[in-house]
Structures are given as C-alpha cells and as structure tokens.
Amino acid sequence: MIADWFKPADPADAKKPAASSSGSADDGAAAAASSEKAAYAQKRREEEPEIRRELTDDELSERRAAAMRRKLAASATGGQSGHPGDNVTFEGMFRGLNALLMSENMGHFHDGIEVNTQRQMHNMLVASKLSVGSPQSAGWELTLQSNGFADVNAVTYTTSGRMSLMHQRMFKSGALGVLQFAAQPTPAGPQGNFFGMLQWPWMRNGTSQINYLKGQQVTLSHAAKILRGTCVGAQMTYDTMQRATSMSWGATLQRKNVNWFAQWTPDKGEWKVATTRHDWELDTEVFAMLEMANRKGNQGGEDLMSMISFGLKKPFIGGATVQACLQGFSRLKATLDLPFGGDREGLNRVNLRYCVQYDAVKGAAKQGISLTL
C-alpha cells in the first residue's frame, strides 16, 4: 500500500474532468463574468452619442402622429399648462375685490327672471339664456362656442337683433389675443362695434396688456409680482371721446389669510384702500374699503366724495352661499345661491340664485331670480 502512495501519477488521469462540485463553481463564475460584460456593453451603448442621420418620410410622419397623440392626451386631461388667468395683470390684481363688491361687470346682479342652460358636446358648447321682466335684457340669447387646442370661437345671437363674433387665441409664447365684433340695431340703423385685447407676458410674473374699444377708449397696462405676495402695476387710459389721458397706479399685498389693495388715480383725484380677510374657523370672508371717487349727486352732476364699503361672503355645507355688500351706507346688495339635486351641473343639478339691490338715495329696489339648468 505504501508503494502505491509513492507511485507516479498516470498522464491519462490528468485529462479526466474535475469533480462535480468544482465544475459547478467554475460554471457560475463564468456566467457571472458573462453577465457583467453584457451589462458593461449595454452601458457603453447608452452613453455613446447617437449618430445623426436624416429621417425618412415615414419616420417624420410617425413623429408628427406621436406629437398629435400627446397633444390630444394633454387636451383631454386639462389642456395647456400655462393658463392666461394665471398671469399677473392690472385688472386681475383687483378681480377678487370686485367679486366681493359685486361689481356690475362681474355679473352678480340681474333684474327679472333668467333661465340658463348649458351643454357640452365634445369640443362644442351650446348655451342659451331666457330673460323675462327686465327691460334692458328681455328676450332669448343663444351662444355657440367651439374650443380648439389654442383658440376659442364664439357666436352670440339675441332676439333683440344683437349679434357678436368672438375669437380668442393663445400663442406658444404665452400671449393671449381676443377679437370681438358686435352689431346691434339702432333708430339710425345697424351700428357695429369692435373690441381687441392683447396680453403679453414678458416674464413669469409680469404681463403687459393693451385694450381697444372702438370710439371709446384705449388702455395700456403692466403689472408684475416683485416679491412673494406683492404685486404692483400701472394703467394708462386714453378717452377718445373727451380726448383725455389718465394714469392709475395699483398695488396688492397678500399675507396668509389677509389681502390689502390700493389704487390711486392722481389725474382724477380718486383713490381707494381695501382689505379682505378669510376666517378659516368660520369659513367666512369679510372685506372693508375706503375710497374717494366721482359719484353722481342728487343734482345729477358728479362730485368727489368719500365712501366706505364693507361686506361678507359665507358658504354653507351643501353648496349654498350668501353674499352681502353695503356701499356708502346708501346701497345694499345681497345674493343667495342654492343648489338642488346632485353634484353634476347640467345633468342632475339645478342652481337657484336670488339677488336683491336697494338704493336708499333713489328709494328703489330691484330683485331677480336666476335658474341654471
């Protein structure tokens, strides 16, 4: 046996395969090395720049089709990211205050009874309004509106003979343009009117705007956000009828739940200072404003007079809202909004609005009811 131990190895035995355990270990190491080489080659291919080449007509068509599909998807999920209403404008600085004051141009008050219907069909909007009991706006009004990717076209017709055509377009740079043509019958014959507006954002927090109303006025304004919650702006107005120019300056300041507004027109001697506050515990928004402005007196003329205004807006559970405003202790405005039915307006929901206005100087009261189906 001892001789067998010291016996020289046979060369044929060296050619035999190794044991099974050592063979499996070598195979695993080789597989790991192969996977690392494949991963390294894939990483190099990703890091190397692509060789530029001219695209074929089929590839160009496919790219255009893919861009159109992305545009359609973005439009279906909310449209373009940059909305014109997000820009800081001189009029937009005081939009929240005018809504609490229930200004006439905000559409809070109407006289008589109104029935409004509105339906959306794909990119087409059909709206109608029937007014009864109001001598100024009695009749039926029909509006057809077409919404595109970057433009809006609308046609309005009323039974009183008034027609209007509006075109609105938003450009890639963020600019917004509006053109509106209107015609209405007069005792002297049909009379046309024209309105144009161009809004141009110079930077993210600054916007210039020019308005033109045929035969009445031209307005040029600029507003910018200089600090967080602080906006300043200026507006120049040229009255084409009186051939007079006036300049207005404005500023707004927002801090948490308190807003401050200030506007000054030195050419007319008018100014106003206002503040609004939102009480989160009571879910109520209150405001107060002190102003010096031209107001019609008892003799029919206009005189500078000071006036204080205050009011509140209170929403309730279920969607009801009460809003009231007292201007100069002489005019009271109040509205009550009541929703009925479900939560989808135009399908299973009806909105009722009752508004009342009392003028202590004239001793007259107006009231109206609006139904939105």
Image (cartoon, rainbow, N blue to C red):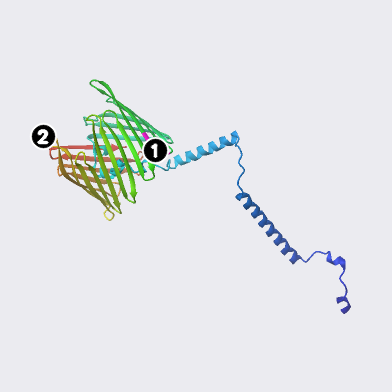
- Quadrant in which the C terminus is drawn: top left
- Residue furthest out toward the left: 299
Residue 287 screen position, x and y as percent: 23, 49
Vertical arrangement, residue 278 with respect to residue 130, above or below: below
Residue behind mark 1: 175
Q: Say what amino acid the circle numbered 2 marks.
A: Gln
Vertical arrangement, residue 7 with respect to residue 33, above or below: below
**Main SS of residues in magenta:** loop
Q: Nearer the viewer, residue 36 or 88?
A: 88
Q: Which mark's residue is nearer the viewer, 2 or 1?
A: 1
The crowding category of the residue bearing disc 2, from other C-alpha atoms within 10 Å (few below 14, some 14 to 19, many at least 20), is few
Residue 232 screen position, x and y as percent: 30, 46
Picture quarter containing residue 55? top right
Q: What SS does tag 1 mark?
A: loop
Q: What SS does tag 2 mark?
A: loop
Q: Say what amino acid the circle numbered 1 marks.
A: Ala
Q: Which mark is residue 303?
A: none
Residue 261 screen position, x and y as percent: 25, 47
Picture quarter containing residue 331? top left
The magenta region covers 173-177
Q: Give the residue displayed 87% in from the left and 76% down from the top.
A: 6
The answer to if 186 sits in the magenta stretch is no
Q: Give the residue displayed 23% in from the left and 48% down from the top.
A: 274
- Quadrant in which the N terminus is drawn: bottom right
The answer to if 176 sits in the magenta stretch is yes
Residue behind mark 2: 299
Residue 27 screen position, x and y as percent: 72, 61
Please give left or right for residue 25 compared with residue 101 in the image: right
The crowding category of the residue bearing disc 1, from other C-alpha atoms within 10 Å (few below 14, some 14 to 19, many at least 20), is some
Asked whether the beta carbons under mark 2 and mark 1 sit within 8 Å of each other, the answer is: no
Q: Nearer the viewer, residue 302 or 78?
A: 302
Vertical arrangement, residue 30 with respect to residue 320, above or below: below
